[in-house]
Structure formats: C-alpha cells, structure tokens
Image (cartoon, rainbow, N blue to C red):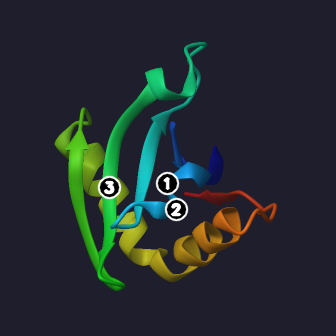
Amino acid sequence: MGKLAFILQFILSVFPADTLENRRHIYVVRRGSKKSHRGNTVAKIWIEENGVKKIEIAWSELSKADENLILETIDKHWDELNKSIDEVFAGKKIRIKHIK
C-alpha cells in the first residue's frame, strides 16, 4: 500500500498492483482501527479518465460532508497526488503529505 496523504481521520492511498487499472484512483481509508487496510477502506475515488483530470466517486461509505472534503482536497492537490502515485508505481519511497 502506498500512503499518499493524511486528511483528518483519513488516509489517501494507492495499491501498487493497481497500476494496470484503466483509470487512476485513490482509496480513502479510515485511520485508527486495528482492522486490515482493506477492512478500513471507506471510499474509492476516480481522479482521472484517459489521462485527464476527472474526479468522481466510484463508491463511498462516507458522509456527504466527508465526501465533499475529500473531493475538494484531491482537486486542490491533484498534481502533487498524481506525482506521488507515479512514484509509488515506480517503486520509489515517498513522503506522506499531511493536509489540514
């Protein structure tokens, strides 16, 4: 799992194995539970389509307020998150962003 950023009680992450998927996406994981990573995943957000920025929810268990916060944050930090995803997929270590 490649952790990209922390936003309040959430972690934005990617799985290196997802490099072959047809659309780039980010998983939203709830922090603080002792369950497995996948057990804490509360949303999947598409962030592009055919290489063009297009942010939309694939599925979500989040409240509307949390969804809006996550979508706005991804939009605001889209370039930086995409660069981090490229680095994760290339097998590089990245510095996890703390977004407030």
Name of the residue lying farthest toward the right: 93
Going 26% across and 49% down the picture, which residue do you hit? 67
The residue wearing badge 1 is: 18
Give the CA distance from mark 2 to mark 1: 4 Å
Q: Are marks 2 and 1 in contact (CB under 8 Å)?
A: yes
Residue 89: x %, y % from top left: 64, 64
Identify residue type, mark 2.
Thr
Specify few, some or many for label 2: CA neighbours under 10 Å numbering under 14, 14-19, or 20 or more: some
Give the CA distance from mark 2 to mark 3: 15 Å
- Between label 2 and label 3, give the one nearer the viewer: 2
- Between label 1 and label 3, give the one nearer the viewer: 1
Going 55% across and 57% down the picture, which residue do you hit? 100
Q: Is residue 46 left or right of residue 39?
A: left
Going 42% across and 76% down the picture, which residue do you hit? 76
Q: Closest to the observer: 6 or 15?
A: 15
Q: Could you say whether the residue bearing mark 3 is in a helix, strand or loop?
A: strand
Residue 99: x %, y % from top left: 58, 59
Q: Could you say whether the residue bearing mark 2 is in a helix, strand or loop?
A: helix
The residue wearing badge 3 is: 45
Identify residue type, mark 3.
Ile
Quadrant position of residue 85: bottom right
Residue 66: x %, y % from top left: 30, 44
Residue 11 in sight in this render: yes
Name of the residue lying farthest toward the bottom: 52
The residue wearing badge 2 is: 19
Quadrant position of residue 28: top left
